[in-house]
Image: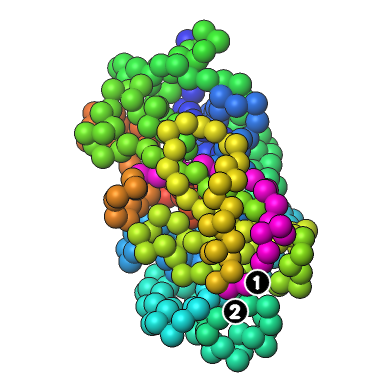
Amino acid sequence: MEEIEVLVIGAGIVGLAIGYKLSESFDEVLVVDKESGFGKHTSSRNSEVVHSGIYYQENSLKAELCVKGNKLLYEFADKYDIPYRQCGKYVVATSQEEIFALEELKIKGEINGVNNLKIIEEKELKKKNPQIKGVGALWVAGTGIIDTHRIMQTCEMLIEKNEGMIAYNTEIIGIEYIDKKYEVAFKDGTKIKTKTLINSAGLFSEEISKMLGIKTEKNDLKIHWCKGEYYKSSKIKNINHLIYPLPDPNGIFLGIHLTINLQNEVRFGPNAYYVDKLDYKMDTKYKNDFVEAISRYIDIEPENLNPDDVGIRPKLQGPSDEFRDFYIKDEKKKGFPSYINLTGIESPGLTACLAIAEKIKKTLNY
């Protein structure tokens, strides 16, 4: 049976970032994914926003890794010529009552270490964004948009440059912990032994833990699939910044927001609702919800909204749960040392990917 030093499960943006960072220190790093290529799920079905870190609870991993990741991601993009635009965003208040919520959001962001936050009044908001309806806004300079495909492509290239390996169409069907090593069985009949196993399987991370015998529900590690849809509009033009409403008070999502992509197309979304089936089909019954939410901060006609994309997030937070943080742990207390379990890696996972990778590297004492 072939033996390697590190096996990373999942070639989404986080798994590839981990593979890249670990391939700098380990001689034998293998990243596997059951799909035909990288980022086939959450990593390629999102807003492509580089977040700042204003939303997350103080001292949470989401806050810490988002703020660190923001800086690392822009530096990485500069170094490897990855297209991005640090365009900034406005979180818009549509009533005087919401101004107080903006102030609280600003304080939370500053506590988390986010710089260049500013509350602006209606006059300044209208001057810079005449189309936007609002009585004020929180300006977040560090937010941007980035080419996530190129990030993953670059990490893939760096893994191979560092003599690491990536295997697609490689589905895991079983894992056993024997003699301080993990024996991983694949659907094609092959097996690999590794001392260090990293679970970055995203939507399927709970399945990986179950293969080891970890009781995920008992350990509060059940993954909930949360679906979000996107619409686009060619009628709205001359928008140079991202426009966000105040976030959902339950913390399930950030509200249906306006983003621009690198081609200057205007997109709206996502909404958020829990599903039991992995299905990327657009459900247009929620279109009126989009129109209602968007119309609070910019005028839009229903006929000018066209279906765009659909994504699904792996959330630890269930429909009636409070805030849940990223879960990133060496599961040695559960009897599985050097099994690094990443689960519930949803937003801001894209922004945090390189910071997460550095955290894993430190966990392994490199």
Residue 23 shows in the view: no
What's the magenta region? 297-316
- Which is more N-terminal, label 1 or label 2? 2
Whether residue 336 appears in this view of the structure is yes
Quadrant placement of the C terminus = top left
Q: Amino acid at mark 2?
A: Lys
Q: Which residue is mark 2?
A: 133
Magenta residue check for 314: yes
The answer to whether 161 appears left or right of 243 in the picture is right
Percent of width and height locating residue 126:
64, 86
Disc 2 and disc 1: Cα gap in Å?
Answer: 8 Å
Dot 1 crowding, Cα within 10 Å, few <14, some 14–19, many 20+: few
Q: Which residue is mark 1?
A: 299
Residue at the spot x=50%, y=15% of the render?
186
Looking at the image, which is closer to me, 13 or 155?
13
* Circle number at residue 339: none
Name the residue: 44% across, 38% down: 275
Q: Is 286 displayed left or right of 204 in the figure?
A: right
- SS class, disc 2: loop
CB-based contact (under 8 Å), mark 2 and mark 1: yes
| Front label number (2 vs 1) | 1
Q: Amino acid at mark 1?
A: Asp
Residue 260: image location, x then y, percent: 69, 62
Coloring applied to the structure: rainbow
Residue 24 spot, x, y in % from top left: 56, 42
Along the line of sight, the residue nearer the viewer: 17 or 43:
43
Image coordinates of residue 162 in percent, x first then y, are: 63, 37
Figure quadrant of residue 81: bottom right
Instruction: Tell me how many marks there are.
Output: 2
Which residue of the protein is positioned furthest toward the bottom in this rendering?
A: 123
